[in-house]
Image (cartoon, coloured by chain):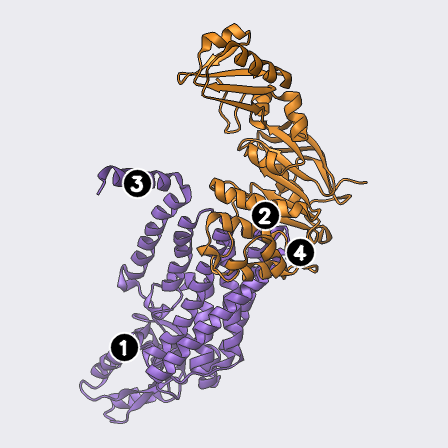
């Protein structure tokens, strides 16, 4: 089966700056694919080339098996887009906004159904300008669905939202998974990629540095597991035979590769009669994967 | 009150201002432009050129001498003696004309021999231009008086009678109303287009639209139609006020519709051209002002072009608003269809060019 999006050797220059450097990705039908990277990594440039807003310096983008440069109306009929930092018409209601965009397409999905799917029932007659940031983004996602698209582009759909509003948008995007939509998502939030994506590509300085499922990426590039014991003595921990870091608040942190080591630590702690207030076990996450691969954090800072 | 917060906010605004190159440019360029403009309009009133058309039916040395006397203070243009005066005036949109009748020289010669016969010149004036008319009357009456003194010492053998160029009685408000319509269509179309395009660009609406099957031309056309609708709403509100409050008699005909539609398209196109170079909303206001203000004052909106130096009158003739104002006056007030048609053709052509240019310069995508 042909991929829904097939990006081949895509490169984009802005003068001397290479924003996207020879990247190739394929996204399959029904997949939620996340492009994860800090600001300026090349995420939006790539997605905007795929949407036909920008032109590549070299390389190609095939959508639904056809090369797409933005001109094909038949492809535009089948895609839905939420641009980055989008704001809609302030003096239109939610329903009016959706109707406005729906009017451009031959194929339409029932507006009331979209409103329900995005959990905007009680806001349907509210003016856009009166909505909170989270609701505005949900309207943005809803707008991308008016033509019942086969492929949805969501460019940083939760940037600038508080955690609660972010979760609301995630819930709305998750609802699309059950409908089998193919979604190309960009984000610089590691939790967002972990929560939503079937597959993640990590982009850094215009290049893809890793690609795969969240689980595989962490397994291949993560640091195993982090065990934290709060309120105990470092001397005891050192005697256990593991390298430990102790914070000022007497929290001991250990990194282990193998999940069996966690059981061993716990057995020894109990055997030695060591006292601690609480224990926390955390698997490595995409933030650590990104750090390991690039030497930077997702906020774009160098690791110490 | 927290003075530190106020100072911080103030400094942040100063920084944001000077980092916006466009805002800084227009903040300086706009007042300079206004200074140049108003300086040019009001400096050296001696330079003001007022045109009087003269038809010399006598065609003698004496009548030529009389015309030369007028020429010292007025710009004289000639109406050929063989043409029908009223038709020529109407066809050429003439606002001030003097007819020297046959027998002018004979009457002067007879007066030298003691005759008291008089000869009457006909001065035709556009009553809507009262400030200019005053000057023309003064020059004509003064010149005739000088000649009378020279010929007879006291008797007025050379006199003039005045006619209105139109059969209706006009007031300044008749001149003003079409100007207000032209001005309103211009400002709403230019500002509306610049603000909308700048805002939509910033909010990502244009990017979003570019990913839909809605084409750029469809979008532009719908915006033009919207501006045309707004222009007609304004036009009819202005006409209603003019009719109800000022008792203006307005002619509503096809020219009015074509001119207002063309004007809305022309000025929206102009707005599109400008918004191509305006990146921030803060700059939009100044950029719009830089285009609307000169037209407002140079294109005969508030006062006739003859009140300005001749070279500014020439500049006015390259401004679209001039043709809108003149066309609307001809169509709605004077009922001069020939001149209305000419002005309509010009503004229609300007609209076509500006719309195509504006549309070509408006980009959604990279």
Residue that badge 1 annotates: B134
Q: Earlier in the sequence, mark 4 or mark 2?
A: 4
Residue at coordinates 71% horizontally, 33% vertically from top-left?
Answer: A25
Q: Position of residue B149 (x, y in %)?
A: 20, 82
For the residues marked 3 and 1, what is the alpha-carbon distance in whole angstroms? Answer: 56 Å
Q: Write down the chain letter for disc 1.
A: B
Position in image of residue B103 (x %, y %): 36, 89
Q: Residue furthest left?
A: B154
Residue at the location (32% across, 51% down)?
A: B31
Q: Secondary structure at mark 1?
A: helix
Category of crowding for the residue at label 4, using alpha-carbon neighbours closer than 10 angstroms: few (below 14), some (14–19), many (at least 20): many
- Is the residue B248 above or below the residue B190 in the image? below
Query: Which callout, 3 or 2, points to the residue nearer the camera?
Result: 2
- Where is the N terminus of chain B found, in terms of image quarters? top left
Identify the chain drawn in orange: A
A128 vs B102: above or below: above
Q: Residues within 10 Å of mark 3 (few under 14, many from 20)?
A: few
Alpha carbon distance from label 3 to label 4? 44 Å
Residue B275 shows which numbered tag? none
Q: Chain of mark 3?
A: B
Q: Residue at x 41, y 85 (%)?
A: B57
Check chain identity for marks 4 and 2: say if they share one: yes
Q: Which residue is mark 2?
A: A172
- The image quadrant of residue B143 is bottom left
Say which chain tag 4 marks. Answer: A
Which residue, given by chain and number where applicable, does mark 4 sit on? A147
Q: Position of residue B197 (x, y in %)?
A: 50, 54
Find disc 3 in the rendering and name its residue.
B9
Nearer to me, B216 or A294: A294
Is residue B267 positioned above or below A264 on the image?
below
């Amino acid at each position: 089966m042909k991929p829904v999006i097939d990006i081949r050797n895509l490169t984009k220059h802005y003068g001397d700056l290479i924003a996207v450097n020879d990247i190739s990705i394929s996204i399959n039908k029904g997949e939620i694919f996340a492009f994860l990277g800090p600001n300026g990594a090349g995420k939006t440039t790539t997605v905007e080339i795929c949407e036909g807003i920008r032109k590549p310096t070299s390389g190609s983008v095939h959508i639904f098996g056809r090369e797409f440069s933005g001109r094909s109306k038949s492809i535009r009929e089948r895609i839905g887009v939420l641009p980055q930092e989008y704001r809609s018409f302030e003096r239109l209601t939610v329903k009016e906004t959706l109707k406005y965009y729906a009017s451009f397409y031959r194929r339409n999905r029932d507006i009331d159904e979209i409103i329900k799917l995005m959990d905007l029932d009680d806001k349907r007659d509210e003016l856009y300008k009166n909505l909170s940031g989270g609701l505005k983004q949900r309207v943005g996602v809803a707008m991308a669905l008016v033509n019942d698209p086969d492929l949805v582009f969501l460019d940083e759909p939760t940037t600038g939202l508080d955690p609660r509003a972010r979760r609301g948008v995630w819930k709305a995007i998750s609802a699309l998974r059950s409908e089998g939509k193919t979604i190309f998502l960009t984000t610089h939030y590691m939790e967002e990629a972990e929560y939503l994506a079937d597959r993640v590509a990590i982009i850094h300085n215009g290049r893809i540095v890793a690609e795969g499922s969240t689980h595989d990426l962490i397994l291949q590039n993560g640091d195993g597991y982090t065990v934290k014991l709060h309120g105990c003595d470092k001397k005891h921990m050192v005697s256990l035979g593991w390298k430990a870091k102790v914070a000022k608040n007497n929290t001991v942190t250990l990194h282990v590769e193998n999940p069996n080591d966690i059981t061993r630590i716990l057995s020894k702690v109990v055997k030695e009669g060591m006292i601690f207030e609480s224990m926390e076990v955390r698997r490595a996450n995409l933030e650590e994967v990104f750090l390991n691969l690039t030497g930077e954090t997702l906020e774009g800072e160098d690791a110490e | 009150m927290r003075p530190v917060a106020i100072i911080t906010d103030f400094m942040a605004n100063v920084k944001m201002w000077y980092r916006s190159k466009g805002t800084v440019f227009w903040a300086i360029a706009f007042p300079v432009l206004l200074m140049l403009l108003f300086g040019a309009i009001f400096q050296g009133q001696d330079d003001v050129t007022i045109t009087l058309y003269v038809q010399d039916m006598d065609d003698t040395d004496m009548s030529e001498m009389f015309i030369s006397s007028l020429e010292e203070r007025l710009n004289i243009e000639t109406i050929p003696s063989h043409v029908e005066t009223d038709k020529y005036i109407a066809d050429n949109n003439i606002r001030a004309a003097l007819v020297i009748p046959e027998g002018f020289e004979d009457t002067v010669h007879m007066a030298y021999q003691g005759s008291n016969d008089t000869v009457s010149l006909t001065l035709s004036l556009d009553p809507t231009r009262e400030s200019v008319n005053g000057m023309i009357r003064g020059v004509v009456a003064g010149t005739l008086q000088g000649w009378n003194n020279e010929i007879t010492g006291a008797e007025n053998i050379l006199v003039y009678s005045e006619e209105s160029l139109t059969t209706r009685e006009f007031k300044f408000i008749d001149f003003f109303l079409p100007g207000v319509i032209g001005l309103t269509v211009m400002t709403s179309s230019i500002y509306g287009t610049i603000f909308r395009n700048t805002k939509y660009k910033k909010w990502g609406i244009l990017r979003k639209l570019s990913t839909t099957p809605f084409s750029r031309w469809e979008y532009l056309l719908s915006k033009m139609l919207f501006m045309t609708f707004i222009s007609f709403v304004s036009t009819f509100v202005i006409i209603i006020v003019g009719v109800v409050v000022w008792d203006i008699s307005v002619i509503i005909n096809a020219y009015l519709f074509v001119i207002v539609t063309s004007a809305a398209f022309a000025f929206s196109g102009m707005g599109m051209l400008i918004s191509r170079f305006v990146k921030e909303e803060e700059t939009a206001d100044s950029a719009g002002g830089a285009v609307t203000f000169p037209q407002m004052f140079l294109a005969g909106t508030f006062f006739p072009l003859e009140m300005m130096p001749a070279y500014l009158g020439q500049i006015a003739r390259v401004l679209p608003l001039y043709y809108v104002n003149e066309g609307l006056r001809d169509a709605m007030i004077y009922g001069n269809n020939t001149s209305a048609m000419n002005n309509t053709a010009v503004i229609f052509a300007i609209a076509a060019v500006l719309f195509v240019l504006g549309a070509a310069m408006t980009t959604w995508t990279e």
